[in-house]
Amino acid sequence: MEFAERLTALAAKVRQQKGQIETEEATKNAFVMPFISTILGYDVFNPLEVVPEFIAEVGVKKGEKIDYAIMHGGTVQILMECKKSKEPLRIEHASQLFRYFAVTNARIAILTNGEVYEFFTDLDAPNRMDAKPFLVLDLNDVDETLIPELMKLSKDEFDLDSIISAAGELKYIGAIKRAIAAEFREPADDWIKFLTSKVYDGPFTQRVRDQFTGLVTKATKQFLNEQVNDRLKTALGAPNFPMANDAEIAATVTSEASVEEDPVETGIETTLEEMEGFHIVRAIVCGDVKPARIVQRDAKSYCAVLLDDNNRKPIARLHFNRMQKYLGLFDENKAETRVPISSLDEIYEHTEALRSSVRAYLEPSAN
């Protein structure tokens, strides 16, 4: 099994079992030890590779233990401190990691609750663990761009120099991406004020703030959609991609807005992956029907792609709420078949099935 597949399998296990994990020990046994063994590749039962409850002399803190020390080349290379699942990680949890980092050869420290893994090193000062992680792995939402870096910490491909040299860039790129994502989900006042100042010359009163909060939110979502469309046009080839006119675009926006549900009230939130998947499906079938007629409607368990905003005319369903993604395809009887996909690009492999669904609805006898 490939590295990414093992990570996917562990992420699925975490999602399935985290509701039953109540203690730190249960977290270690169910999630952390499998991470060390199946992802990083170290034998958790071999004290030459993994030392549980590792002890080092740390000033006046005699006999203080850290949860795991991972050995490589006969020396301690990675320190790991665990907290119970469902408990949000805080830098205060890393106090023992800070102390141990200074008195061992370890250059990597990991703080985890079994779901989120925060990786630290000493970028700011030699032999002193940084206060902020250079890499954050969330098994509830795995960032696939981090997988090559994570592999460098595995037993078979251990490359400390490479991971340390990349840590500075990883630290700030990761932090910037998380900050951007937060602004797109819920724009902060400073962000709203900054963008408003670029387009509005009047004073930034409370009324203006209220007005532009909604406008900034809509503009950021539309910007993302446009970026996705640009990628699709490039992938499909612009000459073969029929562009909608202004009226059709307006109709699409209106149609999508009419079915958009408030995630605060319903618990439904359309993810960027779902929006990108929707645009891929729409790009595929636009040779048979105008793009304005293809609409997405989100639900808690899947995102539906419909013809004419009619749930009796399903084209596809995007089951992206789990680590293993599925593309739902429909036959002539509207029976759904779920096809596992590992990336959004694999949707293109089902072009004919998607187009067949649309063509069936365009036939005179279709309901």
Image (cartoon, grey):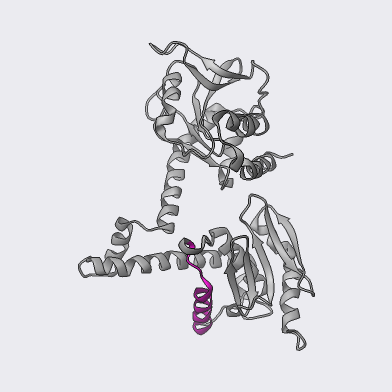
Chain part drawn in magenta: 246-263
Q: Is residue 103 visible?
A: yes
Horizontally, residue 92 falls left or right of residue 74, namely: left
Horizontally, residue 168 falls left or right of residue 228, namely: left
Residue 99 lies in quadrant: top left
| Depth check, front residue: 25 or 170 | 25
Q: Main secondary structure of the magenta part?
A: helix
Residue at position x 65%, y 75% from top? 311
The x, y position of residue 82, in whole percent, is: 52, 29
The x, y position of residue 309, in whole percent, is: 60, 78
Which of the image's four quarters has the C terminus? bottom right
**174 is higher (above) or lower (below) than 180:** above
Q: Is residue 153 visible?
A: no
The x, y position of residue 205, in whole percent, is: 22, 66
The x, y position of residue 271, in whole percent, is: 54, 59
Horizontally, residue 147 falls left or right of residue 119, namely: right
